[in-house]
Amino acid sequence: MVEKFGGQHNGYFLPSEGANNIALALFTFESLSAYEEYRHQSLSDSDCIKAFEFADRVDCIISYERSFFRPVLG
């Protein structure tokens, strides 16, 4: 759904070793403001609302933390 709002979905990542209660979802947006616009628009998008409701119903998200990264090279 990220791509619907101009972002690129880079995948979901689970640990192969160590902590087993952490997963990462990596997205790329042109800018922080483009990401914030995605977050704003997703709140009223029917597909996103269904995904939020599903996650709440099955209780698959314990906590949600956002971090912002930039490439080391390039």
Image: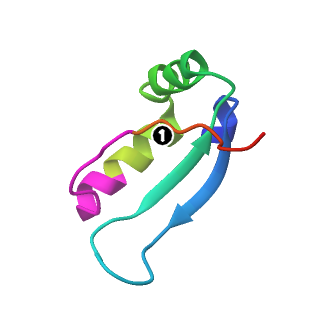
Q: Quadrant of residue 38?
A: top right
The chief SS type of the magenta part is loop
Q: Position of residue 68 (x, y in %)?
A: 48, 35
Tell me the amino acid under the disc marked 1.
Cys
Classify 68 as above or below 62. above
Q: Name the foreground residue: 16 vs 9.
A: 16
Classify 40 as above or below 66. above
Determine if residue 74 is in view.
Answer: yes
* Residue 62 on the magenta segment: yes
Q: Position of residue 66 (x, y in %)?
A: 37, 39
Residue most extreme to the bottom: 17
Q: Secondary structure at mark 1?
A: helix
Give the residue displayed 73% in from the left and 44% down from the top.
73
Q: Name the foreground residue: 27 vs 67.
A: 67
Q: Name the foreground residue: 22 vs 50.
A: 22
Q: Position of residue 60 (x, y in %)?
A: 29, 63
Q: Would residue 30 be found to the left or right of residue 41 on screen? A: right
Q: Which residues are magenta?
A: 54-66
Determine if residue 1 is in view.
Answer: no
Label 1 crowd bin: few (<14), some (14–19), many (20+), radius 10 Å: some
Q: Name the foreground residue: 61 vs 42.
A: 61
Q: Position of residue 29 (x, y in %)?
A: 64, 31
Q: Would residue 61 be found to the left or right of residue 35 on screen? A: left
Give the residue displayed 78% in from the left and 39% down from the top.
74
Q: Would residue 49 be found to the left or right of residue 38 on screen? A: left
Q: Quadrant of residue 30?
A: top right
Mark 1, residue position: 48
